[in-house]
Amino acid sequence: GEMDFGIDKKTKKNIIDHAAQLRRSLIGQTAANLIMLDQNLVPQNMYDIKNKYTIVFIFDPDCGHCREETPKLVNFYNAHKKKFDVEVYAVSADTSIQKMKNYIKEMKMSWITVNGPRSYVGSYQKLYDANQTPSVYIIDNKKKIIAKKPPIEKLEEFLTHYEEVQKKKNSTP
């Protein structure tokens, strides 16, 4: 049943909307496709990525925590992209293409980076629980969310464990 006691209509609507947003980005759900413009103003479709894993990395060039976490992701990506067959689809939360270009260069990001506000599918914040930056999701090759907001320094450990579990599942008759 519904609990309306002491809640005004606006607050109730906000709670329902937030729950719907969270529901769309739960582990096990199909990840919402993102189609956004890259630094060259070319649309990049996340569903076109054919790697075994896609890391969705939502960041803001002005975010201090993003500046700490991005180099960790760059190091992980450079060391493990082949081992885990992983690609990164990074979404800049800032409207400025120039800030995004500067951040890509400064952080030595060699993956797909797009501008979140320049979207063909609506707000990434409504499709993913990404009201804070950075936000990280791991998506498998079937486009299912397998991890939500894991610590970047635990990505190798997570993917190693995930692959072991999948191997056991697939070998069990």
Image (cartoon, helix red, strand yellow):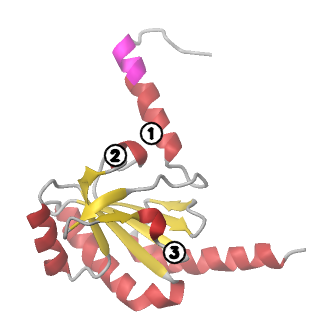
**Mark sitting earlier along the chain (3/2):** 3
Q: Quadrant of residue 18?
A: top left
How far is disc 3 from disc 2 in space, using C-alphas?
A: 24 Å
Total number of numbered discs in the rendering: 3
Residue mark closest to the camera, 3 vs 2: 3
Classify residue 64 as left or right of residue 53.
left
How far apart marks 1 and 2 lie (CA) works out to 8 Å
Q: Is mark 1 on a helix, strand or loop?
A: helix
Q: Position of residue 93 (x, y in %)?
A: 23, 55
Mark 2 neighbour density, 10 Å: few (under 14) some (14–19) many (20 or more): some
In the image, residue 93 above or below residue 68: above
Give the residue at mark 2: 125
Q: Which mark is residue 92?
A: none
Q: Which amino acid does label 3 sit on?
A: Lys
Please give the residue where the numbered disc 1 appears in the rendered image.
21
**Toward which corner of the image does residue 17 lie, by quadrant?**
top left
Q: Answer yes or no: do the residues labelled 1 and 2 have beta carbons within 8 Å?
A: yes
State the CA–CA distance, disc 3 to disc 1.
26 Å
What amino acid type should be assigned to the residue bearing mark 2?
Gln
Per the rendered image, the range of residues in magenta is 9-13
Q: Position of residue 34 (x, y in %)?
A: 39, 56
Q: Where is residue 8 in the image (x, y as percent from the top left)?
A: 37, 11
